[in-house]
Amino acid sequence: VGPDGCRLSANTTLSDELQASVFPNPSHGQLTLQYNSPEKADYLMKVTDLAGRLIVSETLTGVQGMNQHDLDLSSLAKGMYKLSIENASGESIVIKVVIE
């Protein structure tokens, strides 16, 4: 925490900043990604299987504040997948998603 009481951005991780969540999780494929963007910014969202194969890749345009993005993964086989969100600096966070 800086002298003025503000958090220093160098110490803030992307997962702290975005507070991203996916719900419902587990799901039958209809998911909602919710994230809090500190500013208007583009993010790269990817869904991969556990072997690392890319299934979905989308650019999300986030507005400052809370954002929501609906995702339909109902065509995927049941199992575990990784949803990642990457910012312009190349930092990313990964959320495990279960499709039943």
Image (cartoon, helix red, strand yellow):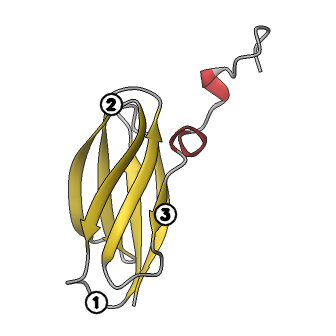
Residue 41, numbered label: 2
* Residue in the foreground of this view, choosing between 81 and 6: 6
Viewer-nearest residue: 21 or 45: 21
- Which amino acid type is marked by label 1? Ala
| Residue 90 at x, y percent in the picture | 39, 38
Say how many tags the image has.
3
Identity of the residue drawn at 36% across and 63% down: 32
Residue 5 visible, this orientation: yes
Q: Secondary structure at mark 1?
A: loop
Residue matched to label 3: 95
> Residue at (21%, 53%) from the top-left corner?
58
- Determine which residue is flagged by label 1: 77
- State the SS at label 2: strand
Left or right: 14, with 34 as reference point = right
Mark 1 crowd level (few <14, some 14–19, many ≥20, 10 Å Cα): few
- The numbered mark, 2 or 3, whose residue comes first in the sequence reads 2
Name which residue type carries label 3: Ile
Which mark identifies residue 30? Answer: none
Q: Is residue 16 above or below residue 94?
A: above
Task: Please state the horizontal and vertical placement of residue 73, each as a whole percent of the image.
Answer: 26, 76
Q: Against 22, is 44 above or below?
A: above
Report the Cα–Cα distance between label 2 and label 3. Answer: 20 Å
